[in-house]
Amino acid sequence: MGGVEDNEPPSKRVKTSSLELENLSNTSSLSEFINPLGGLMARPLPSQGREDMVGSKGVIKKVEFVRIITKALYSLGYERSGAVLEEESGIPLHSSAVDIFRKQVLEGNWDESVIALQKIGLDDENILKSASFLILEQKFLELLGKNRVMEALDTLRSDITPLSINKKRVHELSCCVISPSQHMLLGFASLEIETSNARMRLLEELQKLLPPSIMIPERRLEHLVEQALRVQREACYFHNSHESCFSLYTDHQCGKDQLPSHTTQVLREHHDEVWFLQFSNQGKYLASSSIDRSAIIWEVREDGEVTLKHKLSGHLKPVLMVAWSPDDSQLLTCGMEEVVRRWDVHSGECLHVYEKNGLGLISCGWFPDGKELFSGVTDRTICFWDLDGKELDSWKGQRTSKTSDVAVTKEGRHMISLCRETVILLLDRETKTERLIEEEQTITSFSLSKDDKFLLINLINQEIHLWNIKDDPKLVTRYKGHKRSRFLIRSCFGGTEQAFIASGSEDSQVYIWHRSTGDLIQALPGHSGTVNCVSWNPSNPHMLASASDDHTIRIWGLNRVNLKRKEIYSNGTVHLCNGNIK
């Protein structure tokens, strides 16, 4: 990625002549950069005039840099390459004292290992004792595994106990002498099979304990590269791509074209205003509900096309909302002050109808186990049911409001609902403790983030507020720009790591904001009526759906034409993801 493919025929590929090479060597000392096999080698990294530093900023110590590369080569199994780098650079991965120490440990020469430990340059007495403890513990376990109980006991008494550290572990080791089967619980299994592996694990534990200047931590180079990629991702303002888009060849940067801003489909199966829609948890389906008294299950194909799977009929009134079961195998639909129906997603069959005599239901949702569900009731209570329709409980009193929004966190412990027009209640169902989110304006709807830590609240004054609800609720960001005066408008989290906020609007547009900054990024025209609800595909950051009073659902995706044009004209200095979705 970020490079140019070589599609030219062999006759058009430029090949440097021997004369050109000779002239070049006379002017730039090319011979200094030719390896024994005759291939051109890379020039030395710039060092800002200092031989002990590399890099354009002069902040990378050459010795550390080479040692980390050498360590990575050995870790990847390139033993010969690692050895060549040590020899050619003159920079050993380890000092001779450390090499001797590692050899003694791997060969199980425990007394010699402790002696070698004293010579590797440790200044911290606590680290020295802890490392000695680990070595002698392994000696003890191996002696015990060979049934040399008296020698093991002598090691425990004469070598381990005098260190005067980790007394709990010393007690556990002593139990192994009394009951040899206990050594299985301490991580030492079959002696014949596990001895070499146990010594390698010991070396890894010692490596974590010792200063990195003495023994470089495992996978250090990988950690540094991942850290650099993470910094690039966090600095990418429009980041909305999969991890597979990252390349080490170029710096990562997404453009605005990574946001779903191009209409890819218009779905016209509803015959009246579409009030609600929601992608399934795995993003393979989309469900919508309408004033036409129907709900529709749509299937999202692998190529991104959305097709009708089932049209669900049976409600006698407009369908307010839908809710997916945790495993996406079932769907709830709620009629306006009517009943809740449970459907089988694969067959389209209605499995059960939930109702309360003399009352209407106005919302629905699932508990995380998929075995219970809840619904808001017109008498301002919240009713809890099992799948067979048995009423398990009812949350009564003045603590709820006549609203269609209720949410439960993924572990099932916290329930979120409106208790007054301007107040949201966060109830801990285990401790019965309550926390409140108090707004100054009337709340019209809310949605919960995927990690259960944030709540997105739509207000009557044309603002959307983001609250952190992890501990004491705290207002984090405000989003403005969309239009709302008469209707219920819903918003949602979306994009990679839910880095964006989307909302419908009464001016027929879809609005997208940057979640952390609150900046309005795009307003998407296309609908001819109020956009009531939006939903971002949780598995595909490049797919957004919107439901409108114009009787249609729009599927938004990437503009492939612009992406191809950008790939053609990119100079390769910045990596622009192509947005491909598998």
Image (spheres, grey):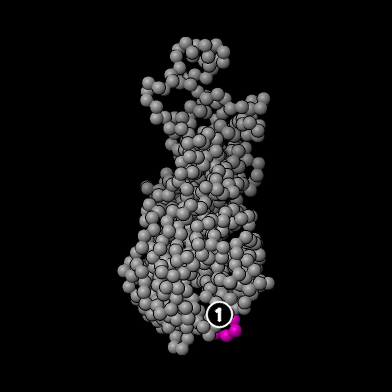
Query: Percent x, y for residue 256?
Result: 55, 48
Q: Which region shows up in magenta? A: 395-400
Magenta stretch: dominant secondary structure = loop
Look at the numbered disc 1 and give the secondary structure of its residue: loop
Please identify the residue farthest to the left as the structure is shown: 347
- Looking at this view, is 490 or 110 the one in front? 490
- Looking at this view, is 389 or 502 the one in front? 502
Q: Is residue 158 visible?
A: no
- Looking at this view, is 401 or 54 the one in front? 401
* Quadrant in which residue 57 is drawn: top right
Q: Is residue 503 left or right of residue 177?
A: right
Q: Specify the amino acid type for callout 1.
A: Lys
* Vertical relation: 456 (above or below) 20: below
**Residue located beneath label 1 in the image:** 402
Q: Is residue 385 left or right of residue 112?
A: left
Query: Percent x, y for residue 266?
Result: 43, 59
Query: Which residue is pictured at 41% across the width and 22% down the height?
Result: 13
Q: Is residue 554 visible?
A: yes
Query: Which residue is pictured at 56% across the width and 73% down the height?
Result: 416
Query: Percent x, y for residue 144?
Result: 44, 52
Please identify the residue farthest to the front as the structure is shown: 528
Query: Percent x, y for residue 225?
Result: 54, 41
Query: Which residue is pictured at 51% across the width and 53% down the height?
Result: 261
* Quadrant in which residue 449 is drawn: bottom right
Query: Which residue is pictured at 49% across the width and 19% down the height?
Result: 34
- 380 in magenta: no
* Vertical relation: 14 (above or below) 108: above
Q: Dot 1: within a 10 Å radius of its alpha carbon, few (fewer than 14), some, or many (20 or more) residues?
A: some
* Vertical relation: 486 (above or below) 259: below
* Vertical relation: 370 (above or below) 559: below
